[in-house]
Image (spheres, helix red, strand yellow):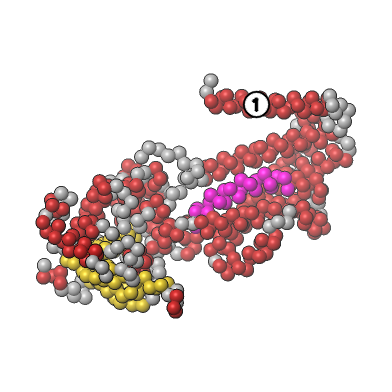
Amino acid sequence: MNAQLRQLLVSAGGIVGAILIWQFVATVPMAGGPLPPFSATFTELTQLLASGEFWSSLADTILISLLGLGSAAVIGVVLGILIGSFDPFRYATLAVLEFLKPIPPIVILPLVVLIYGPTTQMAWFLVFFGCVLPIIMQTVAGVHDADPVTLDTARSYGMGRTEVLARVTLPSAMPFIGTAMRVAAPAALVITVVAGLLGGGPGLGRSIYQAQAGGDYPSLYAYVLVLGMLGLIFQGVSRLAERRTLHWHASYREVLPA
Amino acid sequence: MAEANVSSDATVRLRVDGLAKSYGTGDKAKVVIEDLTFTVNAGEMVCIVGPSGVGKTTLLKCLAGLQPATRGQASIDGRTISGPPPEMALVFQDYNRSLMPWLTVRKNLMLPLRHLRLPAAEAKERCDSALEAVGLSHAEHQYPWQLSGGMQQRVAIARALAYRPEILIMDEPFASVDAQTRFDLEDLCLKIRQDFGMTILVVTHDIDEAVYLSDRVVVLGSKPAKVLKIVDVDLPAPRDQITTRSLPEFARQRTDVLSLIKRPA
């Protein structure tokens, strides 16, 4: 048996084990409590998969997460490159950014709900707010990490400032940006759910809230199962994307014998 | 040999005139280069040698327009260098920092050509011939980090060749490769001069290399850097690693240069 297959089997065993523990806890020590057994949750899940409402709610969640993440990535990287490359920008923004950094998006949720109401825009903005700062910070770090010899090389060949930024500084900062994106992708999902759960925004969060309010625990945990799987997919896709964009970086290289 | 001593303005391409560079100002200023004056003629191969830490890299940065001089100036064909000159290309010692790891060999060569806005066919032809000149046509789709050190430095040289500079400046280009590769690259350098008719300025701390490559050697003394002497190297061409290096003349020239550097300044 090869190592990869064995690893896969052990992982599958871990999942089965977790499900068995859940089933046991819900049926023996907590029988009749608020935690539904896995079997009931799973049955509920199969019913959910047949409803159109579930799929549109799932689509909302994915859309909002990706919109928020995407806009945070574009704006975060552009701002990060500017702040990292031009000192006046840095001095003007550093204090503000450092101030905003420890503020979790949930703190501004009531304000954003007041402005936008329980809408897609509200959730989108929250996701954007939660993801953009770490992306800016990491991009700035990446810009500062660009090798001076590489930059001198580009300049010595007469490349202009914008060209150097786009073709040398940005790729140099990519490993840092990649790390930020890998952390931000699951965070975007979490914030989307929070926006639905606490702010009434569309998506799985709102579905969870409604299930909870109706006391429908099997349905609630079925949504949680879906969320968990969605989180795994987000994590997997962002890892894959990182590996593909950064295949040249020292931590991903497959070095051939020269 | 009469011509070597007549450096009439008509043949001077690169002129360094009273160049000084210091960092910081006032009492805290650190003078790296005190006062350098020398010229490089068209088509000439000149080596700059000096003890390490003498400020050779600083000098190159001033020549390449990457740093302004504090006093004096460097000029090409009488025009003062104030930014990276379009007719010049630079090869750095640290090939693994100077090549872009995210680009294949061919794309590394193409990068500096973009802003020249060449027709695609010409850009391609330049890359092809540059890769062929350094013997790396087969490696064009590989990434620099998949290649050996010597091959990487040849990629960096090919990138400079594809840019078609009239003046090629190299900063300790062979200091990070093994001895055999070093000999190969030195000969590549001589071949480039022959084939492309470039003016080449090489900074090195290796005296044998300087004598082997050069028409003239500029010997720098420390610190701060100043020109101790400019030595004409009159070794016959074509040069060859075995025969040239075994000439008594070669030994005499390298002893001359070495004694200049060893002598306490």
| Residue visible at 80% across and 29% down in the picture | A41
| Residue visible at 25% across and 46% down in the picture | B180
Q: Nearer the viewer, residue B104 or B148?
A: B148
- Numbered disc 1: secondary structure: helix
| Residue visible at 53% across and 63% down in the picture | A85
Q: Is residue B224 visible?
A: yes
Residue furthest to the bottom:
B26
Q: Is residue A176 left or right of residue B35?
A: right
| Residue visible at 56% across and 43% down in the picture | A241
Chain for disc number 1 = A
**Residue A223: in magenta span:** no
Which image quarter: residue B137? top left
Question: Disc 1 marks which amino acid?
Answer: Ala
Q: Quadrant where the C terminus of chain B lies?
A: bottom left
* Boundaries of the magenta span: A169-191
**Image location of residue B44, percent across then percent down:** 21, 64
Residue corresponding to mark 1 = A12
**Image location of residue B97, percent across then percent down:** 41, 53
**Residue A179: in magenta span:** yes
